[in-house]
Structure formats: structure tokens, C-alpha cells
Image (cartoon, rainbow, N blue to C red):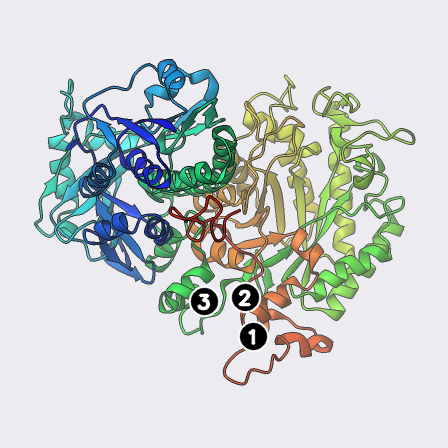
Amino acid sequence: MRIAIAGGGPGGLYLAALLAQLGPHDITVWEQNAADDTFGFGVVLSDETLGGIEQADPAVFAAMSERMARWDDIDVHHRGTVSTSGGHGFAAIGRRELLGVLQRRCAELGITVHYRTRCPDVAVLQAEHDLVVAADGVNSAVRSARAGDFGARIATGSSRYMWLGTDRVFPAFTFDVAETPCGVVQLHGYPYSDRASTIVAETSEQVWQRLFHDRCARDPEPGESDLASIELVGELFADRLGGAALLANASRWSRFRTLRTDRWRAGNLVLLGDAAHTAHFSIGSGTKLAMEDALALAACLHEQPDVGTALAAYEAERRPVVASTQRAAAASQAWFEDIDRYVGQEREQFAFNLLTRSRRVTHDNLRTRDAAFIESAERWFCGAGADPVPPMFTPVRIGGLALPNRVVVSAMDVYSARDGVPSDFHLVHLGGKALGGAGLVMTEMVCVSPTGRITPGCTGLWNAEQEAAWRRVVDFVHSSTRARIGVQLGHSGRKGSTRLMWEGIDEPLDTGGWPVVGPSAIPYSAANAVPHELTTDELRDIRDEFAASARAAARCGFDLLELHVAHGYLLSSFVSPLSNRRTDRYGGDLAGRLRYPLEVFDAVREAWPAERPMSVRISATDWYPGGVDADASVEIARAFAERGADAIDVSTGQVVREEAPEFGRSYQTPFADRIRNSVGRPHGGPAVIAVGAISSWDDVNSILLAGRADLCALGRPHLHDPHWTLHAAAEQDYAGPAAMWPDPFAAGSRPPRTGRTDGPPPRLDLVRHGPVRTRHARWNPTGSPHGPGAG
């Protein structure tokens, strides 16, 4: 097979070396730079990547190992202190050394490499070769020549960063934070040999403008470094450098560009490494991803019967892995770009927050790596003199309401009422969840009027029969459990008069419906009714209905009241500019759109007992251009906090049908994080509740200990397992009071005996994070095309 590879970086050279060992291929590599040109300093490779290299080409692995630096610790420097976490297992090699290893290997295998040579025209390459590989980086000329085939999209980060080296060998992966009068500058550093380390300096655009802008060359020559800026970086991190020099190599301030492509192949042309995708430097190396791509592509070409099938298999295998890496990298990038939000945290929380920023490393994962580090962080979280326990089992207060743990059963509509009256189903459903150990159980959205229901099966609180039925539920929770119970009040607005969820969610009723209302005459979708635009008098009447329901909820004995200002229901639809086009005092800018929801809040707060807390659920983004976004959500939360909200329950979306949510594990938590660390408890504000695809106790502990939220609300996990919190306690070997086992269930407070007599029962991890596919066992370069483990 004739193979052309554009790009003589690690990915392209490694692919060439692998393919040369798999068959009688005619391979040519074109590299526009000289053989000894390289940019950057050291690259980090994971143990998994190294395992794949060792299996595929022991000669390359052995040569790399001779030149590698390895270490286990991460040092986090923060306000004159250092926190060290061990057990991480890193390896790095100088980029120049890595290129040398691969260049020599290609020469040994007889591969033709043209340096200082641009590759021929792409059409010519495709016509003259069986396979063309674009491994020519993020600015790929090959990809650009066929731009319409790949759908490349680039997102540019908001921070500035610069690659540097130093002749100091750091003892660990090192993070340092320099707080200047102009703002924060941060350092990422790691050793890559026994003589040198890589450094990345990073800062926000605003700080860069104040500190570094005037030091940068105005008309730089190619390859020129910002020497004056580098000098200042050295001054800021003099303690960390210990007198060592900073080394430059075309070191200039840049913004990171995240490349995503819709397709990786077009005919016999395929993208590899940075030509197909990039991931922020704070989570890993583009070199690592490129070499993993090369392993996968070579294996697929070896295993599959033809090039087209092989390229499809390669993309199918690698795309999910890359997408997962890019999601983690985006979370890590956002954390560092918003580091100002976290530098005020205390040492233990700041270090834990930094280590878990991408959500790939978690509380339990860190316990496995370094139990002493987690014990120290838990001891800080629990407070002076307290024994360390899992963060989810520490007490918390919402206003005057004391909760024994930080787990909330999220509000979940079950559409099982008749005429708004909760039934035995609700008693068993909510009572069962309260028996399951959560500190707080929330009702579904309880509607304030018959026309405020979403469906005919929704509960309400507008008459005495409903009030009596709710009092029965509340009395059971209070008499038979230690949980507290909260009521969520809402009005469906333009999303009302629809079918039961299992009959067609948000689909309008065929018969028996009722008129829907909203801030403006804009339907939720083309299939839904056009809402009546509410008049000022009608708004006052609905406000009074909310207040009447609040008084009824107080008589029922609910411990907390939550106002539903999310998910496109009435109050939420006032907040969003996508559904509110009013020109009176209840429309216009955010202050105008918030006016009516705040008036309702004030009325409910006045009707609700002063000693009992109030929460507000908000949609922190509409997931649609022109709608509410993360910045607006902070202002929304601040407005309710200033009116006396004791908690903000942070959800997202469901405001317009055309939304495009970025679903994923704990995908809404970053919005809770932003609100908490902008207007929440660290600033004397309300507690913040995170919700949304939080499914494991490990994630709950991670969110809480990092300071991303004060409580976590889980819905579906409690449907799958009503005793989720009790089981989480047992799985963590926690038997303290915050687990809240009812006396009749006490025998279940420990997992069943397994016959072991040596130590605690085995732990059960219900959720696996970040599965990674490997090529270790599949590689069989000298055997049959379908060697051991292939397929």
C-alpha cells in the first residue's frame, strides 16, 4: 500500500513506524520544518499510552524510557502554603528527544521523510496513494484544502498562555498561583528530564493587558520570544524557580484553540492528532492523543479488509475517547480561566478543587491514590475537632432549617394526582424516599391553580382536600423518618394543558384542556397553544394564588418552600427573553423581566412563616442563543438572594423546545459552581443546590468538598433506588448519625457478610468514570491480521 503522511511530528512519525512493521508499505512523510526544529519543551504521556507503545514497538518504548522523567506527586502552591497529593503516576519526555527517537526508528525501517518540504497538492496525493494522512497540526494545510469535507470548528479560549522551559527540575507536577495587584498569574510546571522542566504561564486577558501587554514585541520576527514578558514571569515565580533560568523557544502569549471536526475522513484521506482535534494543555498532551490515534489507525488498517472500512473503524473507535477527553479538557480550561473565583478558598479546598476540576479525578479516586490527602481535606471540611467523614454526611443549614446530611431528593413530577389531590402513590413515593436517608425530600411541582397545572395528573394546593392529603404525607415524613420535606410551588404557564409524560411529554391534550397563559403570546412550540398574554390584573391574581398556596403549605407543616422559576414554566418564561417580549414594566432588560417573579417571591415570602426557609429553582441557561446564559444566571441568583432566598437550586433549560443542552455527567454543576462562588455562601449568600445527572456518591462528595455546591439534589438515582443515600453510607463504610437508618432498617446499615473475616466488607463502586479503550492486547505486528484478542 502506498501511504502519504503530511506532518513529521510525533503522531505522523509514529504512525509511519507502526505501519512499516505491519506490512510491505511504501510510506512517505513530508515535514515543512527541519528535522531538528521543535517548539515547546516536554510532553506528558499516560501510563496507558506508554503501555500501548510498549506492546506495539518495544524498541521505541525502550528508547523513550531511557530519556523519560517519572514522578507521582502534584504540588499545589497557594498563598504561601503547599498541598501535596501523591499516587498520580506521570511520565514526560522532551519533545526534541521524542522526535529524535521516532526519527531514528523511521530511518531504521527505511521510511522516506522529506524535511523542509511541503507536501504535494492534496488531490495529487489522493490520486497517487492508497492512503493520505493529515498529521500536520491544528493549522493543517491538508485539512484546509478540503475544508468542506471535515467541518472544522475552532473555539478560542479567553486566557493567555505561554510555553517556557527552565533548567530547574521540579520534584513534582507543580501548580503555583501568583496574586498581583493586577490579578492572578498561574504556573503549570513538570519535569521532562533530569535536567529541565516545562512551564506554562497563564493569565486572564484583563491581567495580561495590565501586566504584560506593554512588554510584548509589537512586530515580532518569526520565532521571536517575548523576552520582557518572560523576565516578569521569572520575577513573579522566583520562589518556585529557586534562581533557575527560564528558557524560551518561540515563547509568545497565545490563546488556546480547541479544534473539533465533524468528520475525520474523506475518501482515502484521514485526519490524525491535532489536525482532527485539540485538548487544553492543562489536562494532557496533544502528543499523547496523536500517538494514541496512530496506534488505533495502524491497528484498524491492519485488521480491516480495505482502507474505507479501516478509516470508518478508526473514527468510530477514537471519536468517543477524544470527545470524552475534550469534555474533561473544557472543564479544566474553564476552571483555570475562572481561577479568580477560587483563590479565596482555604488551602485544603483549593487543592482538592484544582485536582478534581476536570471531573475525571474524583474524591474516591483520590482516596485510592492518597488516602492521607483526602483525610486531611475531609477533616478541614468537617470542622475543627470533628472526625473526618464523607462530605455528603456532614450537616448543613438552609436558613434556620438544620439538615443532618447534604443529599436532597430532587423534585420529580409523577403525574399521578386526580383533580390536584395527591394520592397513596405520593405517600408511598415521597415517604419511601424519606425513609431512604436523604436529608431533604422535595415534592413535585405543586400547582397553585387548576389552570396552573402542567397535566391533568399534576398535584395542586388550592383547596382543603389537597391540603389534607399533603398534610398526611408531611405527617408521615415527620413521624417516621428524620428527613425534612419541602414543597415546590409553581405555575405551568404556556407549557400547561399537556398530556401525561408517558403519553407524550409537552404534547397538548386532545380533549379536556384549559387555556394557557404567559408573559407574551408566544407558544412553547408550533404544536402547543398560543398563550394568552397576561394583563396586570391577571398577574396580580396569580401572585395572590401563589401566596394562598404558600399559606396552605405552611398549615400542612412543610419545612421548606421552593419557588419554581425554571424550566420554562410561568415565572421562568418571564425571565427568559426568548419567551418574554413585553414592552411594559414586566419586560425589556433582565431587571424588567425579573420584576414579576420577584413580586411573586415577595408575596410568598410574606405568606410563608419567617422562621422557615425559602429556596428558588432557576434555569441557569436556556441552552439557546439569545436566551439566559451563565452570566445572567448569576444576576438572577443575586436578585433572589437580595430578596431573602435562603437557597438557590440551580437547574438549566427546558425553556424552548429548540434548546441544545450539553448533556453529560454532572453537566449542570458548573452553573451551580459559578453561582455559589459569585454570590453564594463564600460571600455570605444563600446555600446553592446542584442538580442534573449527578448519579454517584463519589460525585456528590467531589462536588461538595470542592465547594461547587452546598447540597446535591438527585432525582433518577432515587427512582432506581429509593434507599440510595443509605446504600451510599453502607458502601462507604459510614455508620454515623447522618446516614439516618430508620430503626426497622438498622440491619441494613452494613453490607451483607461475605465470609471475609479480615477487615471491612468490600466496597462497591456503582459508577465507573471515564472508560478508556486500549490497544495493548490487540497488537500483533508479526502474526496474522487477526491475532490474539483481535476483533
Q: Could you tell whether 89 is left or right of 37 in the image?
A: right
Q: Position of residue 724 (x, y in %)?
A: 65, 62
Helix, strand or loop at mark 3: helix
Is 431 drawn above or below residue 760 in the view shown? above
Return the residue found at the far bottom. 757
- The reply to whether residue 175 is in sight is no
Looking at the rendering, which quadrant does residue 233 occupy? Answer: top left
Name the amino acid, label 3: Cys
Return the residue at label 2: 393
Q: Position of residue 382 (x, y in %)?
A: 45, 67
Is 730 drawn above or below residue 446 in the view shown? below
Q: CA distance from mark 2 to mark 1?
A: 8 Å
Density class for disc 1 (Cα within 10 Å; few <14, some 14-19, many ≥20) is few
Q: Position of residue 530 (x, y in %)?
A: 77, 21
Q: Earlier in the sequence, mark 2 or mark 3?
A: 3
Return the residue at label 1: 736
Q: Could you tell whether 747 is left or right of 71 in the image?
A: right
Of badges 2 and 3, the one in the foreground is: 2
Helix, strand or loop at mark 1: loop
Return the residue found at the far right. 511
